[in-house]
Image (cartoon, rainbow, N blue to C red):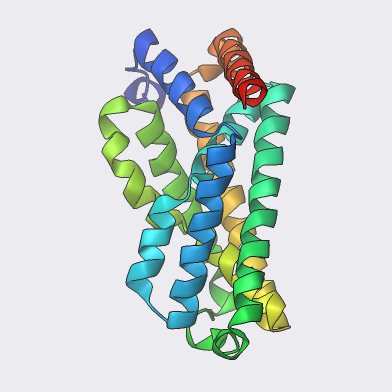
Amino acid sequence: MFKKLFNNITNNEQNETIERLIENSSPRREFFIMTALSSLIASFAIIMNNTAILVGAMLVAPLLYSVLSLGLGIVILDPKLTLRSLATIVKSFAICVAVSALVGFIFIKKAQVLENFFLFSEDFLVSYFIIAIISGLAGTLATVRPHMNESMPGVAISVALIPPLSTLGLALSTSNNLITRQSLYLFSLNVIGIIISSMAIFTIYQFYAYRHKVKKAVDKDEKIMEANSNSS
């Protein structure tokens, strides 16, 4: 019964989901530029103690799509998509931390008051993990069902991938070990929760049967990136 509830998706919708997810998670130059800009905005939001600006930073970042594509790669047992998505996440991680650390070094005095903005009780780590799983479910469903795409901005806010990375960079610049540890915890919990949720949804919607279409979409995207690289 549960499976039937989520089985009302057409072939066209699955094809559209695959193409959109591969395109949005593509490790192109623009992807990393948007990630860096998002981290820059988030860093200033944190040192300014401005939640509204931080929300805006979460809307800019495309990192959520790479985590979802990693879940898809694992479900369909595609090493190429899995490694590509993992590499994109790692590179985005490094970019965000580096950008935020630079901001922290420049505004060292303001960055030293991180506890006023980013400090949570580690007793609630399980609760944060549950929230990550729920957000991952919402994000994957919004990706799978085209008519739910308008929900993605809200999911990007709820899952909070960029804020802990920006906080990590700021904490490293001020040698704040407590905030460094907590931001790493939160980012790791969010990523793992999203991956688990995406794997569940992609399995329920039987995306493993579309492995050849995913591989074709990835190959097409890489050819486009290669052509753009050669032209530039």
Outermost residue, front side: 232
Q: Is residue 218 above or below residue 46?
A: above
Q: Report x, y in % for residue 33.
A: 55, 47
91 lies left or right of 45: right
Location of residue 87 (image quadrant): top right
Q: Is residue 43 above or below residue 146?
A: below
Q: Is residue 38 above or below residue 22?
A: below
Query: Which one is in front, 195 or 80?
Result: 80
Location of residue 172 (image quadrant): bottom right
At 68% from the left and 63% from the top, the residue drawn is 98
Q: Is residue 45 above or below residue 26?
A: below
Q: Report x, y in % for residue 222.
A: 63, 20
At 66% from the left and 29% from the top, the residue drawn is 74
Where, quadrant-wise, is the C terminus in this rendering?
A: top right
At 60% from the left and 89% from the top, the residue drawn is 112
Residue 196 visible in the shown view = no
At 43% from the left and 14% from the top, the residue drawn is 15
Q: Report x, y in % for residue 72.
A: 58, 28
**Total marks drawn?**
0
Query: Which one is in front, 89 or 139?
Result: 89
Query: Which one is in front, 63 or 121?
Result: 63
Residue 16 visible in the shown view = yes
Q: Report x, y in % for residue 9.
A: 34, 17
Query: Which one is in front, 84 or 139?
Result: 84
